[in-house]
Amino acid sequence: MLFPGSILPDMEGGEGTYKYKNSLRATVCGDVSIENGHASVINKGQIIPRIGNIVLCRIVKLTLNNAQANILAVEERALKGSFLGIIRLSDVRKHEIEKLQIDKCFQPGDIVKARIISLGDAKSFYLSTAETELGVVLAWNNGERLMPYNWEEMIDLQSSQRFPRKVAKPLITS
């Protein structure tokens, strides 16, 4: 099983791949397929998100009381399409909810790790980032990647400028 960023054999890239620093890498979770000198990453079988699943999603729209997101992966398996997820202001964190502003927690384009807490309406799932390991995992400012600074800010290492976000606690592996 390959994950996004996994290095593939050195050959021409096909579906589900990209070139980065002279190496071919996977853009999705799946299995490698090599045909006619081209490597592709194939995601077999559509996954249906379920309540309790951890998902990766991209924020696409902010309203006054929620963030709308496209769910891209479920439990580290990429989806063929995407599902709509909604993070309500009350589901961003467990404490000081009355002080939250959705635009201080997320911005369009952010990649967020969240948990599915319920089925919303017929078109969406309700998501939560109220656990410490859930929240923004990737964010950018003017094309520069932001790094976690603390649990509620990310920093641009080039300019030292800080940006408010609901940051996911990084998972440290030894």
Image: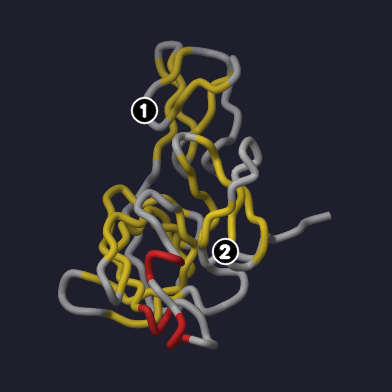
Q: Position of residue 6 (x, y in %)?
A: 59, 35
Q: Secondary structure at mark 1?
A: loop
In the figure, residue 121 lies in which quadrant? bottom left
Amino acid found under the numbered disc labelled 2: Val
The answer to the question of whether label 2 and label 1 lie on touching residues, with beta carbons closer than 8 A, is: no
Residue shown at the point (61%, 74%) measured from the top left: 132
Say which of 164 and 17 sits in front: 164
**63 sits to left or right of 107:** left
Q: Position of residue 9 (x, y in %)?
A: 58, 20
Q: Position of residue 171 (x, y in %)?
A: 69, 61
Say which of 76 and 39 sits in front: 76
Residue shown at the point (46%, 83%) measured from the top left: 99
Residue on which disc 2 sits: 167
> Which of the image's four quarters has the C terminus?
bottom right
**153 sits to left or right of 172:** left
Up-down: is 15 above or below 61? above
Residue on which disc 1 sits: 15
Say which of 33 and 14 sits in front: 14
Up-down: is 166 above or below 156? below
Amino acid found under the numbered disc labelled 1: Glu
Nearer to us of marks 2 and 1 is: 2
